[in-house]
Amino acid sequence: MLGGTWFVGHAVVSAALDAGWDVTVFNRGNSPSAPNGVRLIQGDRTLPPDVAALVAAGPWDAVVDTSGYVPANVLSVAKDLSSVAERYVFMSTVSVYRDWPVKPLTEESEVLPCPPESGPDYGTDTEDGPTRYGYQKSGCEAAVTVAFGGERATLLRPGVILGPREYVGRLPWWLRRAAAGGNVLAPGSPDRTIQPIDVRDVAAFALRTITDGLSGAFNLCRPVGSNTFGDLLRACAATTGEAALFTWVPDEVLQRHGVRQWSELPLWRTFDGVWQVDSTKAENAGLHCRPLNETVADTWQWLKNGGVALVNDRAGEIGLSPDKEARVLAAWRSSAD
């Protein structure tokens, strides 16, 4: 495991240990400790001597990479590991698609162009389209495929991942807001479908790709249309035990008042393609998605037990201030009267 101590990596390591696997974790040691029971090799993936020491510690049946973000580095590391590992499982993202979040997607949809030897400055950010992050992850996918070949490379493309240990803080914000009770501003329509996936289901599928020898790309999301935003917020209220009163404010009203999509109201975005990512291929290969209310309940339990969600740079952008929420609600009620 390259990484293995934060969110997705921690879940993959925990699942592998629970399955009785021998797990080696390679990271710098700057983040929270890895789960008990792993073989820990401390090193920096950007330093060739550290990677050489990792290679010397092999071989392995598979590498799972949750910490690769720069194509050139992924290419170098993957090439070095190709002689001591049978398979490379790379944790990518739906952001690699050229048309996300505007259009519905399948694994056959076009991905953003990025050469596998690209450095950290490749790509550009656009306000409502491709991002440098997406370009870079696409280049990382290409790097893994170059180093391991198509038959030994697995590319996992999750959408929004929720669950215990979530570091961005999307679901934790909604849970805390529901727990505070009162009048809660809810975005758009309760019938809008959403596709967040539980981190533990992502981890379980990552292990399945290894045991079953699955190659190629897989979108990892809940099935299209399986849950709604209303389901999510009702689960938050039920889990926290508070009588939150949700007022669903139309998209155009929120936009008129400058509410930032995806951040101030987490998971709210108006593009048609955001929650239209086809995961049929992964489902046919064994992806199982647990009930959304289970993800919500387990995340709340983690928070109550002292879980710290806001540790990522993006976390500071998450959530609507009470003052702004009150202003938007008041304006909506006034216009509706």
Image (cartoon, rainbow, N blue to C red):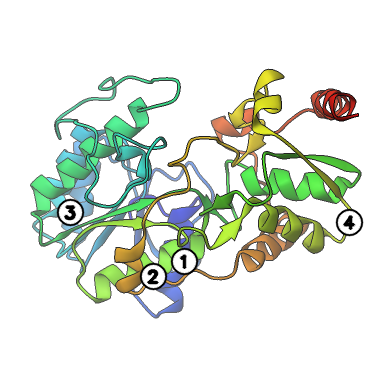
Residue 142 falls in image quadrant: top left
What's the CA distance linking mark 4 and mark 3? 52 Å
Q: Are marks 2 and 1 in contact (CB under 8 Å)?
A: yes
Q: Residue at x 48, y 41 (%)?
A: 30
Taking the image as shown, residue 157 lies to the left or right of residue 115, namely: right
Give the label, 4 or 3, closer to the camera.
4
Q: For marks 4 and 2, give the CA distance.
A: 33 Å
Would you place residue 110 above or below residue 223 in this image?
above
Give residue 64's quadrant in the image: bottom left
- Binning the other alpha carbons within 10 Å of mark 4 as few (below 14), some (14 to 19) or many (20 upward) gives some
Residue 23, can we see it?
no
Q: CA distance from mark 2 to mark 1?
A: 7 Å
Residue where numbered disc 2 is placed: 287
The amino acid sitting under disc 4 is Glu
* Residue at 85% across, 30% down: 336
Give the residue type that dot 3 points to.
Answer: Val
Residue of label 4 = 242
Percent from the top left, x then y, of residue 291? 59, 69
User: Could you say which disc has been placed on residue 55 in the image?
Assistant: 3
- The local secondary structure at tag 3 comes to helix
Residue 227 in the image: state x and y as whole percent: 58, 60
Q: Nearer the viewer, mark 1 or mark 4?
A: 4
The residue indicated by pointer 1 is 201
x and y, in percent, of residue 140 in the image: 23, 40
Distance from disc 3 to disc 2, alpha carbons, whole Å, reads: 31 Å
Cβ–Cβ under 8 Å for marks 4 and 2: no
Residue 135 appears in view: yes
Judge by depth and name the residue closer to the eye, 265 or 298: 265
Q: Residue furthest bottom?
A: 20
